[in-house]
Each structure stands twice: as C-alpha cells, then as structure tokens.
Image: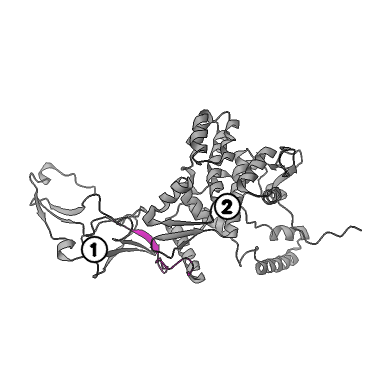
Amino acid sequence: MGKRKASEKDVPQTIDMQHVEGASTSGRPGPLAVYFPSGFQPGRDGSCSWEVHSNTARHNDHVVIARAGDVDFVGSSRSVDAAGVPACKYAVGVLDKSTGVLRYAEVGTGNIVRLEPRARGVNYGPTGALTEQDNDIQARILQNKRLVQAFGSTRRKRQLEQKESAKVGDDNVLAMDAVEDVLAAASDKAALEKMTKDDVLKTVTNIRHIPPHHPEATTASAAYRLEELVPEEAWDALEISRLQRAIEDESYRDEVLRAKGIFPGVVLDRLALITAPDGPAAERRLRAMAFLGPLISLYTGRHRLNVEAQKGGLKAVSARTRIQEDVLRGCLERFYSRAKGEEEGVEVYSRTKEQARMLLLHLLVAALIAEDYSLGARQFEALRAAIKLTPQDMVTHYRELGCTCEKAAGDAASPMKQYKVTLLPPSAKQPPRTLADMFPKLQLARARAKK
C-alpha cells in the first residue's frame, strides 16, 4: 500500500512552537543528530541498535555507537569535524498535526556527529605508530577485509584479491621457506602427473609480484590495462582536463602546471607529441600521464606522510604535494601502510621497501602506456633522471615486467647508457609471444667458467 498523500486538512493553519529543555539545561545526553558518510542508511541497509556513552566530567562529551551486523558506526561529539564554533545552530523537532504544536530542542552537542564504520575487535585509539604489535596489525588487516567485503564495490574486492595473491609473506613463493614447500609440492605433483622439468618450472614461477597483468596477452595493451593500475577512487579524479588544456595553451603549461609543480617536466614535455587529444588512444595516454605525475611525486618524495586532522587532514597533504585529494587517497591506500600516530588525531602513512618497489613498477608501467608502450632513448633518460635511478636499475625493472630493452644512441652529452624499451613488440613469429614468454627465466645453476 503506497504512502497516503497529505491533504490540505492534514496541515495545520497555524503552528505553535514550544521549546523543550535540551541537553544544555537538563544534563541529559541529547537530543543528538548524526550522519553516515559511508552512505549507510538504517532500515534500508539493515537494522541497528544505538548506544550513547557520556563523559560526566566534561560538558557535551558524548560517543554515539550504532551497531549493525559485524560493523559498528562510531562518532564522537569532540571529533575534528565537530570541533570549533558551529557555523549555525541545529535543532530537532516533532510536529503534532492534530494540535498544530511543534515541540523542538537544540541539538545537545551543537553539531552533527559523524559516524564512521569500525570493525569489531580492533583498537582504533591513538596507540602510537611504533608501538602497534604484529597481532594488532594482522587483526586490522583482517577486519579491513571484512569492511571491503561488506561495503566495497566489485572492482575494489577484485583489487583486494589481486593484492592478496601477490603479497610478499611467509605463505607465498617469495619467501624462502614457502619456496621450498612449493618446490616439494610441485615435485610430488610432477611425479604423479609425469610432468617435465619445464612444466614444473612454469608452475613454480607462475606467481610474480608485479602490477596487475595478463600473462596470456599477446599485445601490449592487453598485457597491462590502465584501468587495473589506477585505484578505483582515483580514476575519475585524474586531472586530464588540465593536460588537454596544456596541449593548446603553452603559457598555461609552463606558467601554471610547470611553475607550480602540479605536473613534473617529464610529463609536460611529452604533451606536444599528442596531436589528436580527442581520440581514444590519446585519451588513454593522457590518463596515463595524469596518473604518472602523482606517482613520480610520491616516489621521489618522503616515504612517510603524516596526516594531521587538526591541520587540515588529507586536504592539507593534497595541497602540499600538489596531488588531487581522491588520487592521493587511492595511492596511499595501495602503496602505503596506515597506522595511528603518537599524537591524537594524527595518522601516519609509511611505505616499506616492497611497497616502494610496487609503487615504482606501477610508475614504470604508467610511463610505458603514456608513450604508447615504447620508450625511446630520450624518454628513457628523462624518466630515469626524474626518478633518480641508474640505467641498469631501470633495465632490470623493465625486464622484470616483461619488456624488451635494447641499447640505443641517445644524447652524446649524457655519460649514462641509454636504452629503448618496448613491451611485446610486433613479431612475425608464430604463434605470437605472450607476456609470460617475455618474463625473465629462472636460473637453476651458475654458468660454467670459461677455460
């Protein structure tokens, strides 16, 4: 049965407003007003129970908890969002249509309380980034997975699965003990299935800790797909329009984007080669360039970032690093580990050596896509200088990604060796080579010494 439409007789001609004592005068914890930034709606997304905990020693100090399933939504009247003098006064009221009386009271906290999702069993307090125990970290990772499964999009769940499958740990083939276990298991399987040595090696080396890729691909565009490299929340936030404008407006490119450090020179210098910025191929290259800029800024910047809520939070870090906020958020989630700082309201994002390596590999693939999957000697040298790597390190990483690296004649004034890098170059060989065919082969023994 649908909702009954309100008729004119249902609406009182006059409304008598009556003020009711609120928390400020009665000492009671309420009324309180809350909102869910995650988009959760009680009733539509499930029922929830409510709890309010008050600090009797402090005025208007309340914690609101909405319990729904395996997730709690928690908010405090003393959070950063609620801090400071309110921009306006909030009130809640109930209108009795039969009597025309509106009873209202001011919101007890003076502000609307923001309720953030929290997984149960995890301590979200300011424990200190350096004192967090391994068990706490593992518990947080587990609970974050539950949050993704409960509220994440299909693409976010897929990204989490890919990240887990390629993670470095004691339970995969990148750890020594795990390698021995995998080799033993592969040996047993080979004995049962009468596998050859090549079959065993293919099975053991099938897992590689590199960006999302498709080993069976025979073309460069299918091997590494840009939509799988860019974090979901960053895709629509990439500043492609600025790069498109910079193609037509050189003064905007040099006096704004370059002078203010919004994009690095290695990105801006390549815009002149895009002659048809409206085509699909050019759109892909521009999006890769828009992603490459933030990656270079993060990789060449500090490995540790402090996000201080009282100093503007992530928005302040975004302004300082010249990286769009949603792009920065997606990159921090993918390439950094988050922990509570020693001071209240501070979150510390830091990256391990393995996370820095993964950030670098994403950067190298993005640079390759931006150049239509082929880096010339000049582009190779410009990128190398921007991220401060040696040519040999660049070659090692690109070969790890399945690229072909050949020595090339570059700038004679440069003392560095220069190379041309290509991903799955066209070949007359049949059947065509796949990305898996281009990966470095496992060396089983040392080469014999020359007599």
Q: Compare marks 1 and 2 and give the one earlier in the sequence.
A: 1
Q: In the depicted view, which residue is nearer to us: 220 or 198?
A: 220
Q: Is residue 157 visible?
A: no
Snapshot quadrant of residue 170: bottom right
- Residue at image point 61% right, 45% down: 386
Q: In the depicted view, which residue is nearer to us: 235 or 1?
A: 235
Type of amino acid under label 1: Asn
Type of amino acid under label 2: Leu
Q: Position of residue 355 (x, y in %)?
A: 57, 57
- Quadrant in which the C terminus appears: bottom right
Q: Is residue 255 above or below residue 81?
A: above
- Tell me if 401 is positioned left or right of 28 in this view: right
Snapshot quadrant of residue 190: bottom right
Q: Which residue lies under the disc numbered 1?
A: 60
- Tell me if 8 is positioned left or right of 325 in this view: left
Q: Is residue 416 magenta?
A: no
- Tell me if 73 is positioned left or right of 276 in this view: left
Mark 1 touching mark 2, by CB under 8 A?
Answer: no
Q: Position of residue 311 (x, y in %)?
A: 38, 54
The magenta region covers: 113-131
Q: CA distance from mark 1 to mark 2?
A: 44 Å
Q: Which residue lies under the disc numbered 2?
A: 359
- Residue at image point 29% right, 64% down: 63
Q: Is residue 55 visible?
A: yes
- Residue at image point 44% right, 67% down: 128
Q: Position of residue 3 (x, y in %)?
A: 22, 47
Q: Position of residue 182 (x, y in %)?
A: 68, 66
Per the rendering, the mark at residue 26 is none
